[in-house]
Image (cartoon, rainbow, N blue to C red):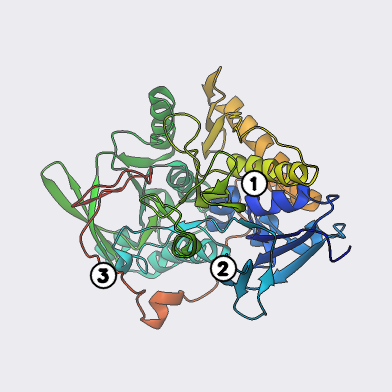
Amino acid sequence: MTEKQPRVVIIGGGFAGLYTAKALKNAPVHVTLIDKRNFHLFQPLLYQVATGALSPADISSPLRLILRGHENTDILLDHAIDIDPVKGEVILKDHPPIAYDQLVIATGVSHHYFGNDQWQPYAPGLKTIEDAVEMRRRIYLAFEKAEKEIDAEKRQALLTFVIVGGGPTGVELAGAIAEIAHGALRSDFHQINPTEAKILLLEGMDRVLPPYSPDLSAKAAASLIKLGVTVQTNSIVTNIVEGCVSVRQGEKTTEIAAETILWAAGVKASRMGRILAERTGVNLDRVGRVIVEPDLSIAGYANIFVIGDLANFAHQGDKPLPGIAPVAMQEGEYLANLLISRLKGQTIQPFHYIDRGSLAVIGQNAAVVDLGFVKFSGFIAWLVWVWAHIYYLIEFDNKLVVMVQWGWNYFTRGRGARLITGEGQNLASGQLPQNNGQNNNLAVSSQTETLSPPIVKV
C-alpha cells in the first residue's frame, strides 16, 4: 500500500457498504470502512431473533472477520458525525478527520413514526439487534405475566399482540408470533392457554403486502388467518399509549387493550442524509433519502456516492428502487466496479438493478414468491425463501448454524432462543424520545412514500 493510492472511505457496514468493500479487495485503492458497530447484521432475519427462533450471533458477523484477508482495507469503529466536501474529509466522533478521494455513504434507515415519536416506547420498531432483543423480551414476558394474572380482562390484554404495518416485516412478525402461541408455547403453561392469544395485524391500505400483486397478497392474508392472525386492513392508528392502541376503520374508532404493540409501518433515512444535504445542497425525498444520479453519485459531486436504503434511485421505472438487501448488494458491487474502471480511465454504463424476485414468509411451510415470470405460494415458496436466506448469509458458520437451527425448529416446533433479557431501555427509564415538534398525524402505510395529513395509516 502506498500513499499515492486513492483513498476510498465507506460509511456504513450494512449490505451496501460491505459489498462495496468486498468487491474492492484487490483494487489499487486504500479502503477505510467506518461503522459504529463492529459487525454486519443480516437484517432480513432480524424478526427471527425478535421471536426467539435464532440468536443475535446467528445473523451477525464481525466486520474484521469478514474482511480479514483484505490487505488494502482498514476498519474503524466510530461514528461519522459530519463531512467536509471542500476539504474532502469525514468528521468522526472519537477520531481525527479521515481524508477521502472517493466517499461512499451507506448509513441506511431507521423506523419512522411520522411526527409521533412519543409512540416509540410503547410500539418499538425492528432495525437493530437491540430492537430485536427488546421485542423478544416483550413478547415472551407477556405470556409469563399472563400466567400470573388472575384478572381475566388484564390477562386478555397480556395475550393480545398488535403489529402495526402489513408489509413484509409486519407479516413475518405476525406469522411468527402466531406460531409461538399455537406451537412453541402450546404446552408450556398451566394457568393459561397460549393458543387463546390474539394476534392483530393492522394495515392502512386495502391489503397486506402492498408491493406484491393482489393475488399473492390475498394468499398471504389467507395463510395468516389460517395461523390464527386477525388481519385488519383499511385501519388507521390514531394514538398509542402504554397498553392501548386506538384504531379507526371508516367512521368507527376502537381502543384495543394490548400489552405488546410492535411497529412495522415505515422507515426514515439516517441523519447523514440531512447532513449531506446541508453540506452539498443535494435534494432529499419526503422521507429524507438522498436523490442520486444514474451512477449513484450526488449532483455536483462526482466523488461522493450514496447507496443502499439511504439512496433514492429513480432512474429505473416509475418509482424509486425499494429499500431491500438485493438492491443494496448490487449497488455496492456496481460502485466498486465503477471506481476500479475510473482508475483505468474507463467508463461504464449507469447502474441498473436486476430484479430477481421478491419473497415474503408467513410461517412454517407458508411463503409467497414473485419471480416476475412466475408467482407461487405455499411449501415450495417457503423452501425457496429458506434457500435464498441461507445462500445470502455472509459467513459459512452462520449458514451452518442457521440451517441446523431451522431444521431442528422445523421438526420440534421449538424456539430455543426465547430468552427474556434486558429491562426495556426508554420505557424502564421513564424517558421518552424527543419529538420533532410535529404532533399532527400523517398517513403512513408499509409503503413509506404514502404521506398525507392529517392521520396515521398503518
Q: Which residue is mark 3?
A: 437
Dot 3: few (<14), some (14–19), or many (≥20) neighbours within 10 Å? few
Q: Residues within 10 Å of mark 1 (few under 14, many from 20)?
A: some
Task: Count neighbours of disc 2 (C-alpha within 10 A) and say few if under 14, some if 14 to 19, many if 20 or more.
Answer: many
Q: Is residue 407 visible?
A: no
Rendering coords of residue 205 (x, y %):
29, 38
Please, which residue is most extreme toward the left here?
A: 251
Q: Tell me which numbered mark, 3 or 2, is placed earlier along the sequence.
A: 2
Q: Residue, x 43% and y 46% (percent of image)?
A: 170
Secondary structure beneath dot 2 equals strand
Q: Residue at x 45, y 52 (%)?
A: 289
The residue located at (42%, 34%) in the rendering is 319
Q: Position of residue 419 (x, y in %)?
A: 58, 65
Determine contact: label 1, label 2, CB under 8 Å.
Answer: no
| Residue under pointer 1 | 409
What is the secondary structure assignment of the residue under circle 3? loop
Tag 2: amino acid: Ile
Measured along the vertical axis of the image, is residue 264 above or below residue 345?
A: below
